[in-house]
């Protein structure tokens, strides 16, 4: 598995785009947030940012999703990274940490896509 490096994080570059509902990109995003929401109780009210970031390689796709949820009476921000197969069908890995992904200029191109 690939490790998220500061180079990749620094490479988040906003490029407007929209993923269609039946595309591998949208399917992979759906699998990512479904798994994230399953990891939290319903009362956490997980809410996802309107935009997420996506990187594609020849055999897998990586999603960077910002969300927020209620934890111990406070609304906290969450940043999630999911890895799927290249078709977005199989979720291979999900990591969620406190904080947010932020777009920055760099040499790695990561698309910004709308979830709506």
Image (spheres, rainbow, N blue to C red):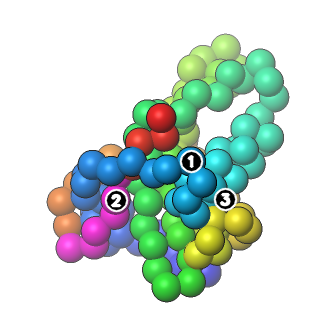
User: Where, by quadrant of the figure, is residue 110 drawn?
Assistant: bottom left
Which residue in the structure is indicated by mark 2? 111
> Which mark is in front, 2 or 3?
2
Which residue in the structure is indicated by mark 1? 21
Asked if the stretch drawn in magenta spans residue 108, the answer is: yes
Q: Are marks 1 and 2 in contact (CB under 8 Å)?
A: no
Q: Position of residue 46 (x, y in %)?
A: 64, 28
Secondary structure at badge 2 equals: strand
Q: Residues within 10 Å of mark 1 (few under 14, many from 20)?
A: few
Kindly tell me whether residue 97 is visible in this rendering: yes
Q: Residues within 10 Å of mark 2 (few under 14, many from 20)?
A: many
Quarter occupied by the N terminus: bottom right
Viewer-closest of 2 and 33: 33
Q: Earlier in the sequence, mark 3 or mark 1?
A: 1
Secondary structure at badge 3 equals: strand
Secondary structure at badge 1 equals: loop
Q: Earlier in the sequence, mark 2 or mark 3?
A: 3
At 67% from the left and 59% from the top, the residue drawn is 94
Answer left or right for 86 relative to 73.
left
Above or below, comparing residue 70 to residue 107 in the picture:
above
Residue interval drawn in magenta: 107-112
In the picture as drawn, the residue positioned furthest to the top comes out as 73
Give the dominant element type of the magenta stretch: helix, strand or loop. Answer: loop
Query: Whole-Å distance between the Cαs marked 2 and 3?
Result: 19 Å
User: Where, by quadrant of the figure, is residue 2 drawn?
Assistant: bottom right
Q: Position of residue 20 (x, y in %)?
A: 49, 50
Viewer-closest of 18 and 44: 18
Query: Whole-Å distance between the Cαs marked 3 and 1?
Result: 21 Å
- For residue 94, which numbered disc appears in the image? 3
């Amino acid at each position: 598995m690939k490790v998220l490096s500061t180079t990749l994080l620094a490479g988040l570059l906003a490029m407007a785009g929209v993923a269609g509902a039946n595309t591998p990109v949208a399917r992979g995003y759906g699998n990512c947030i479904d798994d994230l929401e399953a990891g939290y109780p319903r009362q956490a009210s997980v809410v996802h940012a309107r935009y997420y970031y996506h990187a594609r390689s020849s055999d897998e796709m990586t999603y960077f999703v910002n969300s927020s949820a209620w934890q111990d009476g406070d609304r906290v921000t969450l940043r999630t990274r999911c890895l799927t197969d290249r078709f977005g069908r199989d979720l291979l890995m999900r990591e969620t940490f406190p904080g947010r992904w932020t777009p920055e200029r760099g040499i790695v191109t990561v698309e910004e896509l709308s979830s709506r």
